[in-house]
Image (spheres, rainbow, N blue to C red):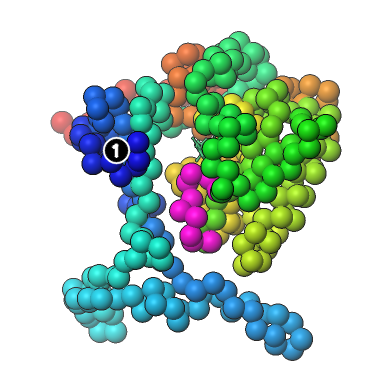
């Protein structure tokens, strides 16, 4: 079925989350009586691609040209002033939209959505977790094993082995004789594929033995270094050099949503959707490589990793909640009083 026909059948149930800053809203509903999650994101403004002008023998990028039909102010169709005061004016406008060059919103659908998906998109309280090697072995690893054995990684296998999204792959590094070092790069489902300010690619490796950061050991260093350098060499060329090698934020997530090793490649200008690029979730690939120099033979298995986790995550209920309570207690951090605001 196509996205369009599925969206038409969507029966709204409730709003999962809404964020005025990222202009993203996630809705829960049903399509053919199965759970569906629709995420809508307002697109960013478009402008012409960068122009390079030779000045003093150097090529100077002139950013954000606003000359094309849909660029910046050019696309204003209606404008209504709300108010003005002294030198300040503000109003609302209607911009001309165009499916190819100026679409209004990006729509993602997950259908049929599992309970894990719904909990992930639902608004939730967040907590800082200090995951020691012991906690990893006793609570987290068994969970990861379960998450790998499921249908959940089907989309990854489809990309690697069954030609899914193959017309979108921008780089493929794969030789049969050395399959385990192979990887490919393609646009992430988070990106509209149009606006380079929001450039978001994902590199997926062919090998299946690395489920997360925790499985990385010193022996993987040369492989990681070579992937990092290939990413920085290849990606700018794929986008006409409007983005430079040092303008890519390259990182991995802990905890990731999918336990098959993959690397996020994002325009440094893009703050990331949700908390995807923030401390407590993203670890720069350069830092991963560097840390492998110091962690010993067991690599990241040896490390206490601190990260942010939502209460809806399965791991919270499977023991991390108790871990947090125990840790705060043993560090002597006082419990908050039960009544915080008593207005009686
Ligand atoms: P993650 O760190 O496991 O999870 O990254 P999270 O960032 O979603 O929390 C997985 C990445 O793969 C995310 O950036 C997803 O947007 C992206 N992704 C997920 N799926 C199911 C697909 C897909 O089917 N195609 C593509 N191109 N990207 C996907």
Nearer to us in this view, 333 or 208? 208
**Percent x, y for residue 209?**
70, 23
**Percent x, y for residue 47?**
46, 72
**Percent x, y for residue 238?**
65, 59
Please identify the quarter of the rendering in which residue 216 is found: top right
Residue on which the image places disc 1: 6
**179 relative to 25, above or below:** above
Looking at the rendered image, the quarter that the N terminus falls into is top left
Nearer to us in this view, 87 or 236? 236
What segment is highlighted magenta in the picture?
187-196
Q: Is residue 54 magenta?
A: no
Query: Residue shown at 47%/13% (left/top)?
Result: 318
Q: Say what secondary structure mark 1 lies in.
A: helix
Mark 1 lies within 8 Å of ligand 1 (Cβ measured) = no
Query: Residue shown at 68%/61% (left/top)?
Result: 237
Give left or right: position of 106 versus 272. Answer: left
**330 relative to 180, above or below:** above
Nearer to us in this view, 336 or 234? 234
Give left or right: position of 19 versus 300. Answer: left
Please identify the quarter of the rendering in which residue 130 is found: top right
């Amino acid at each position: 079925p196509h996205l369009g026909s599925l969206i038409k059948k969507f029966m709204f149930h409730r709003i999962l989350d809404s964020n005025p800053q990222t202009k993203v809203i996630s809705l829960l509903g049903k399509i053919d009586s199965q759970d569906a999650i629709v995420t809508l994101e307002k697109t960013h403004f478009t402008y012409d691609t960068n122009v390079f002008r030779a000045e003093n023998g150097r090529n100077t990028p002139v950013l954000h040209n606003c000359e094309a039909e849909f660029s910046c102010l050019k696309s204003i169709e209606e404008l209504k002033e709300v108010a003005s005061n002294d030198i300040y004016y503000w109003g609302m406008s209607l911009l001309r939209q165009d499916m190819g060059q100026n679409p209004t919103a990006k729509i993602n659908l997950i259908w049929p959505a599992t309970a894990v998906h719904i909990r992930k998109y639902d608004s939730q309280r967040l907590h800082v977790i200090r995951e020691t090697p012991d906690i990893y072995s006793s609570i987290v690893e068994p969970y990861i094993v379960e998450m790998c054995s499921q249908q959940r990684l089907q989309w990854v296998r489809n990309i690697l082995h069954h030609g899914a999204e193959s017309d979108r792959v921008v780089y493929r590094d794969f030789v049969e004789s050395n399959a385990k070092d192979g990887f490919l790069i393609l646009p992430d489902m988070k990106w509209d594929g149009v606006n380079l300010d929001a450039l978001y690619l994902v590199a997926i490796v062919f090998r299946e033995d690395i489920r997360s950061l925790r499985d990385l050991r010193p022996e993987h260093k040369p492989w990681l270094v070579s992937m990092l350098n290939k990413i920085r060499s290849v990606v700018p060329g794929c986008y006409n050099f409007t983005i430079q090698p040092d303008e890519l934020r390259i990182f991995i997530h802990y905890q990731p949503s999918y336990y098959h090793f993959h690397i996020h490649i994002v325009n440094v200008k893009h703050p990331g959707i949700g908390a995807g690029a923030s401390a407590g979730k993203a670890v720069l690939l350069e830092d991963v490589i560097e840390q492998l120099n110091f962690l010993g033979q067991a690599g990241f298995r040896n490390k206490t990793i601190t990260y942010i986790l939502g209460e809806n995550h399965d791991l919270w209920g499977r023991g991390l909640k108790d871990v947090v309570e125990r840790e705060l207690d043993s560090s002597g951090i006082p419990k908050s009083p039960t009544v915080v605001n008593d207005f009686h």
